[in-house]
Amino acid sequence: MIPQQTLSRLKYLPQLAPAESALVQTRFDAASSALWVSMVPREGKPHNFSRELLGSLQSLTEHFDELGPRWETETGEEAVHYVILRSLHPEYFSLGGDLAHFLDCIRARDSHALQRYSMQCLDMIYRWATVLNRKSTTVSLVQGRALGGGFEAALAADFIIAEEQAEFGLPEILFGLFPCSGGMSLLARRIGVAAAERLMRSGKIYSAAEMLEMGVIDEICPTGRGEAAVREFLAEHAKRRKARMALQRARLRMQPLDYAELATVVDEWVDTALQLDDDEIRVLETLVRMQRTEFAH
């Protein structure tokens, strides 16, 4: 069950039904008992976690938390064995947090708004990593860049499959910050605490091949073959699904996410954000301008 402290922090999230958001598309494949969840880009705006998108993804996890791994189709209710998260943007899985909103909050010294938004990001990723995989297996399909909170969201899945051109990075250290949506904990479950910290300190953008070698992602496929690779993975996984689910549950019991620790990281992140110096603010401003320019066309 979700800790009570988690539920209390979710009260400010928009309560949207899964099918109501223009920023999330769902498609159920009855042949593989798989629900495909696609993040839809906003025209002319950076492909990041807007508050509406966060709320829509949250509503999906609430659906599974309340009703279990079931999905209503035209022919009736179907079991959901797999949930796949992907992006419909041709170049980005996700840029992660809304840097422009961060900057506005920092300039206004609005710690409450900064905390509230950061907790929205954390709660969405925490639920994605703890609700959907109770009885289903989750997969992140990364076909473009997954940066910052976008990388953290990908890490919340049980398996990560990436196309060969995909890139991953946690660049927050470049403007004096650090991942605050579970990055350390999620990475540590895959490659250990020391390696996770080194990756977060580097600020480097990594190729899919580098991520595979490090053990961060599970599979690489050729460009344009992402969906086919996921379908092949599901077909193979389904052959021994009951045994693999038992192993998945054992892994999750042995490596649980500590919500109190995750929330503490957010508290420290907010404190650090409000102490950024002029040079760090200028780097953040430059990144915001670059994103606005790139996505304006």
Image (cartoon, helix red, strand yellow):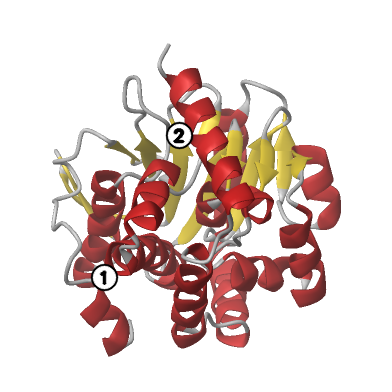
Q: Which residue is mark 2?
A: 87
User: At 81% from the left edge and 67% from the top edge, which residue is drawn?
Assistant: 195
Is tag 2's residue or tag 1's residue first in the polypeptide sequence?
Answer: 1
Q: Position of residue 145 (x, y in %)?
A: 61, 35
Crowding at dot 1, Cα within 10 Å, few <14 / some 14-19 / many 20+, comes out as: some
User: At 51% from the left edge and 76% from the top edge, which residue is drawn?
Assistant: 268
The answer to which of 180 and 111 lies nearer the viewer is: 111
Q: Is residue 162 visible?
A: yes
The answer to which image quadrant residue 52 occupies is: top left
Structural distance between the alpha carbons of marks 2 and 1? 23 Å
Q: Position of residue 51 (x, y in %)?
A: 27, 49
User: At 29% from the left edge and 45% from the top edge, which residue is drawn?
Assistant: 53
Q: Which mark is residue 65?
A: 1
Residue type marked 1: Asp
Residue located farthest toward the front when viewing the structure as drawn? 278
User: At 58% from the left edge and 51% from the top edge, which residue is drawn?
Assistant: 278
Q: With respect to residue 169, does 137 lie above or below?
A: below
Mark 2–mark 1 contact, CB under 8 Å?
Answer: no
Q: Quadrant of the N terminus?
A: bottom left
Q: With respect to residue 66, does 147 lie above or below?
A: above
Q: With respect to residue 259, does 16 lie above or below?
A: above
The answer to which of 223 and 152 lies nearer the viewer is: 152
Q: Secondary structure at mark 2?
A: strand
Residue located farthest toward the top when viewing the structure as drawn? 297
Q: Which mark is residue 257?
A: none
Indicate left or right for 92 with 120 as reference.
right
Residue type marked 2: Ser
Which-is-in-front pick, marks 2 and 1?
A: 2
Q: Secondary structure at mark 1?
A: helix
Q: Quadrant of the C terminus?
A: top left
